Image (cartoon, grey):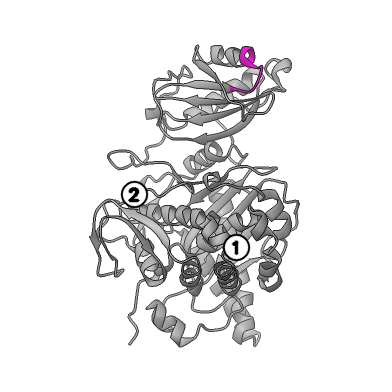
Amino acid sequence: MRRKTSSALRVAQVLLAVVSLLVLGGTAFAWSKLNQITDGLTRSDVIGSGSNSPMDEQNILMVGLDTRTDAEGNPLPDDVLDQLHAGGAEDGGDTTDTMIVVHIPAGGGNATAISIPRDSYVQLAGKFGKHKINSAYTYGQTARKNELKAQGESGPQLETDSAQAGAKTAIETVQQLTGLTITHYAAVNLAGFYYVSQAVGGVPVCLKAPVRDSYSGANFPAGPQNVAGAQALQFVRQRHGLPNGDLDRIKRQQVFMASMAKTILSAGTLTDPGKLDALIGAVKKAVVVDTNWDLLGFAQQLHGMSAGSINFVTVPVVSITLKTPNDGDAVQVDPQQVQKFVREQTGAATSAPSSSAPPSSAAGDPALASYVVDVRNSSGVDGLANRVADKLAAAGYQRGSVTNSATRRTSTVYYGRGQRSQAESIAAKLGGVAVASDSSLDKDHFRVYLGQKYSDDSGVHPASAPAVMEPPAGGAPEITADGVTCVN
């Protein structure tokens, strides 16, 4: 007898599958096999016309669907549902229990995976009103399905056509919230998570303390361990009994995906034809991508990606106990705050107007316009990197990427070969911080790290920003695909 589970069972399946595409695209051996994925991948016309150049900025919306149909709209077999302990076809609904935007800067570079809590209470696209963001897909899908049923459509075609409408509503809603233009879309079904995690032989994870949860079935000791299949599902779906509820579940999801990426990039996976073929087969069975996505070109853009090139973050949250009129408790988010955070993490332009000085070199010294300056916030002060980047742009420097980084006490301007004097000029504008060489930087490219001791003279105090939930005591480690982070 199947055990009925909550709709949160599949909170992380999508990033598993698409990180597979990301990191497979970054390796010469696997790149030669990418056509095996593209030949049999299900496509959906959900992204409007626009530039399809893989060298442009990419903002990929990845969703994990709580659905019991495969990528082509056919019901999942009973034996598969039995293995997943997922109930029957009547259990669950087509909500997006995972929503992540992966940003890749123009020309390639480090990827930033931005998680959006599934219960974020937002204005949905269209005329559906304000609800939890994971229901955007459902509202769009259901409305279209009712129209198509009235026209006599049924079977797999009905499922795929209505799913397309759901995806469009989800895409538009995420664009409204983040201010980013979504360039590509990928969705994975229920079975995908199970099979992809099995294909790589399990994923290393680490827990700070032992857990036992009757809701998810999670029963794990403290410390490092390897999870796959049903255990992997239990690891990523648990939220009951965790100090920060769904936010801790998102951290579980992020560290799992980071470890998954590292596992795929390891020689043990890429040099094992059996594992690689199993991974490709799992992705093809489970994933739907937009019609316009040139995956071969995308793979070329990512060629050479390393494990440390994927950074995982979560949008800021005001409250996790927002009372709503019809949707129960939800997660409260501030759209302006979310868009500000997205700009800081990605350096991308969003639809939200900036309250700071415009990042244009026109108002400053034109002679400085050829110098690109990246800014890394290592201070723990919200918004500091964006304010400093705006300050340097107003002085005439070209704005580079702006992101958060691991905490450090001191501030430093890094420079490439022969450009110490230019770095000292930047340091002087920042109040006289240290400078240091970094041979990996290109000519006229500088990188600023803002430490805890940095004094921001912008006149903006962190307390003046909208209130957000403080991170758990002890701080939150940076999550990348370069190691295994222990979490709650």
Q: Is residue 268 above or below residue 154?
A: above
Number of labels in the image equals 2
Query: Was residue 122 drawn as part of the magenta stretch in this picture?
Result: no
- Labels 2, 1: front one: 2
Q: Is residue 209 above or below residue 402?
A: below
Q: Which disc number belongs to residue 186?
A: 1
Q: Position of residue 444 (x, y in %)?
A: 68, 23
| Quarter in which the N terminus is drawn | bottom left
Q: Amino acid at mark 2?
A: Cys
Q: Which residues are magenta?
A: 415-422
Q: Position of residue 243 (x, y in %)?
A: 26, 51
Q: Is residue 167 above or below residue 265?
A: below
Q: Position of residue 355 (x, y in %)?
A: 54, 30
Q: Decide if residue 29 is on the left or right side of residue 483.
A: right
Q: Is residue 347 above or below residue 297?
A: above
Q: Which disc number belongs to residue 154?
A: none
The residue that disc 2 covers is 486
Q: Compute the Cα span from label 2 to label 1.
A: 28 Å
Q: What's the residue at 29%, 66% (across, down)? A: 218
Query: Could you tell me which secondary element the residue under label 2 belongs to?
Result: loop
Asked whether 158 or 388 is in front, the reply is 388
Q: Position of residue 171 (x, y in %)?
A: 59, 58
Does residue 85 show up? Answer: yes
Label 2, residues with CA under 10 Å away: few <14, some 14-19, many ≥20: some
Q: Amino acid at mark 1?
A: Ala
- Pointers 2 and 1 in contact (CB under 8 A)? no
Q: Sequence-wise, which precedes: disc 2 or disc 1?
A: 1
